[in-house]
Image: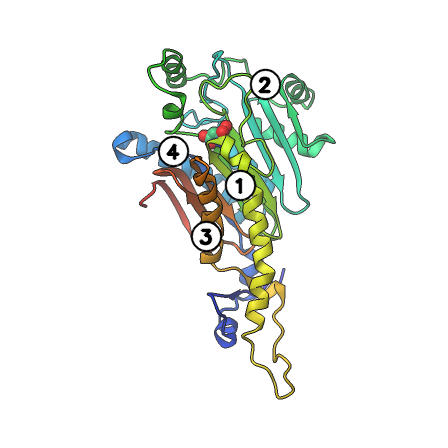
């Protein structure tokens, strides 16, 4: 796909913009991916060096899983699915094995997935029995006429689809059991327990320019009454639209739902883009007849990293103003990956075809 890129920083100047064009050959290979493993009060003093290293290795492994698929020309959907499965299988994260416990000491898992190329989506809420909940979200998207299934019906659909099933105690870890015991004994609030670790998610752009986003979680420790957070809600915890971005969120789900965080960010990017093109057009010199010497075409244009960061930060800021905490990862159709979070840390990582490959935990790195 031919897509020349103009970088616009505030006011664009045409010669420098043209100089920033990339070759079509490079463009063909461009891909990017970002992941998260939860946001919260993740501070150096709360994490041992061993745990720090373990988390970084887990993030790097997940990142490499998705990167390899994208590098080999695979789709964004396949890359995020495989990446999320790696994190679901790792007990360090609150998704799949290692999921937090409900008030009744059960596990109720939530997941969602979205394909930005056609905005098809699938989600599963309050499920149990499926080894990898992200596969159930994907099956809902690909194999059912629905977008969201919940509880017993979703579990039944999973079995009918032949997805790998596990016994109800598969998800349990001693750490999560200890956490729910402490919450039930009122030694510590669920909020304080959860604010250390979380949910997993991935967003990606593949070499065809298609985008995808997915999120998987055990929800919040001690949740009851069938509580569902933002993670399985398309538009709140997950959203992908090839015209704008792919987003996966983590944090205090109720606030992410109220702001519709993932969709809100994508909408603002989609609406900002034509305005930015119009602004750039005005900077193009005119000829003697007063006509622009060059017409800026949408396919030649991208929002700057700063523009995208500002949009993401403003939506996270609004969510924070309501009292929520957490963050997002974001990929754009221009190959950028962005983080935004209002917590001390977020388990995260990103990689792209330009050689970027990094993982992070604390806010200051
Ligand atoms: N957003 C998830 C929920 O509210 C929890 C998390 O991300 O840690 O269920």
**Which secondary structure, mark 4?**
strand
Question: Which residue carries the number 1 mark?
Answer: 261
Q: Is mark 2 within 8 Å of ligand 1?
A: no
Q: Earlier in the sequence, mark 3 or mark 2?
A: 2
Ligand 1 lies under 8 Å from the Cβ of mark 4: yes
Scheme of image coloration = rainbow
The numbered mark, 1 or 2, whose residue comes first in the sequence reads 2
Q: Which residue, as the protein is rendered here, is positioned at the far right?
A: 145
Q: Residue at x 54, y 66 (%)?
A: 23
For marks 1 and 4, the one nearer the N-term is 4
* Residue holding disc 4: 40
Front label number (3 vs 1): 1
Answer with left or right where residue 226 lies relative to residue 361: right
Q: Position of residue 48 (x, y in %)?
A: 27, 30
Tell which tag, 1 or 2, sits nearer the viewer: 1
Q: Badge 4 local density, few (<14 within 10 Å), some, or many (20+)?
A: many
Q: Secondary structure at mark 3?
A: helix
Name the residue carrying label 3. 309
Instruction: Give the label on residue 165, or none.
Output: 2
- Category of crowding for the residue at label 3, using alpha-carbon neighbours closer than 10 angstroms: few (below 14), some (14–19), many (at least 20): some
Q: Is label 3 within 8 A of ligand 1 (CB to nearest ligand atom)?
A: no
Front tag of 4 and 2 = 4
Q: CA distance from mark 3 to mark 4?
A: 20 Å
Going 59% across and 18% down the picture, which residue do you hit? 165
Q: Residue furthest bottom?
A: 288
Identify the residue shown where x is 57% and y is 29%.
111
Q: Nearer the viewer, residue 166 or 303?
A: 303
Q: Position of residue 213 (x, y in %)?
A: 56, 41
Q: In 3D space, how far apart are the residues under numbered discs 4 and 2 (Cα atoms)?
A: 31 Å
- On screen, residue 332 versus residue 175, left or right, reads right
Measure the alpha-carbon separation of dots 1 and 2: 32 Å
Precedes in sequence: disc 4 or disc 2: 4
């Amino acid at each position: 796909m031919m897509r020349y890129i103009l970088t616009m920083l505030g006011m664009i100047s045409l010669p420098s913009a043209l100089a920033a064009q990339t070759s079509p050959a490079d463009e063909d290979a461009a891909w990017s991916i970002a992941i998260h493993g939860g946001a919260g009060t993740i501070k150096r003093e709360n994490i041992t060096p061993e745990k720090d290293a373990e988390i970084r290795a887990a993030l790097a492994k997940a990142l490499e899983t998705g990167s390899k698929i994208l590098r080999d020309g695979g789709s964004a959907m396949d890359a995020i699915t495989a990446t999320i499965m790696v994190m679901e299988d790792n007990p360090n994260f609150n998704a799949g094995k290692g999921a937090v416990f409900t008030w009744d000491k059960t596990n109720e898992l939530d997941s969602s997935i979205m394909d930005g190329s056609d905005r098809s989506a699938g989600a599963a809420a309050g499920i149990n029995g499926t080894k990898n909940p992200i596969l159930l979200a994907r099956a809902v998207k690909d194999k059912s006429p629905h977008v969201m299934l919940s509880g017993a019906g979703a579990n039944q659909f999973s079995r009918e689809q032949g997805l790998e099933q596990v016994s109800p105690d598969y998800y349990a870890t001693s750490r999560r059991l200890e956490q729910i015991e402490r919450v039930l004994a009122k030694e510590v609030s669920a909020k304080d327990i959860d604010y250390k670790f979380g949910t997993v998610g991935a967003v990606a752009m593949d070499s065809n320019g298609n985008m995808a986003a997915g999120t998987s979680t055990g929800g919040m420790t001690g949740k009851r009454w069938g509580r569902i957070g933002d993670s399985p809600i398309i538009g709140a915890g997950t959203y992908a639209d090839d015209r704008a971005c792919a987003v996966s969120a983590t944090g205090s789900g109720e606030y992410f739902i109220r702001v519709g965080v993932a969709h809100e960010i994508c909408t603002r990017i989609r609406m900002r883009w034509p305005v930015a093109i119009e602004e750039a057009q005005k900077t193009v010199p005119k000829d003697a007849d007063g006509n622009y010497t060059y017409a800026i075409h949408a396919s030649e244009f991208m929002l700057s990293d700063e523009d995208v960061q500002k949009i993401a930060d403003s939506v996270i800021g609004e969510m924070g103003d309501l009292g929520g905490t957490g963050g997002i990862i974001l990929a754009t159709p221009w190959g950028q990956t962005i983080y935004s979070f209002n917590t001390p840390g977020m388990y995260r990582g990103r990689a792209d075809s330009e050689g970027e490959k990094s993982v992070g935990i604390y806010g200051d790195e």
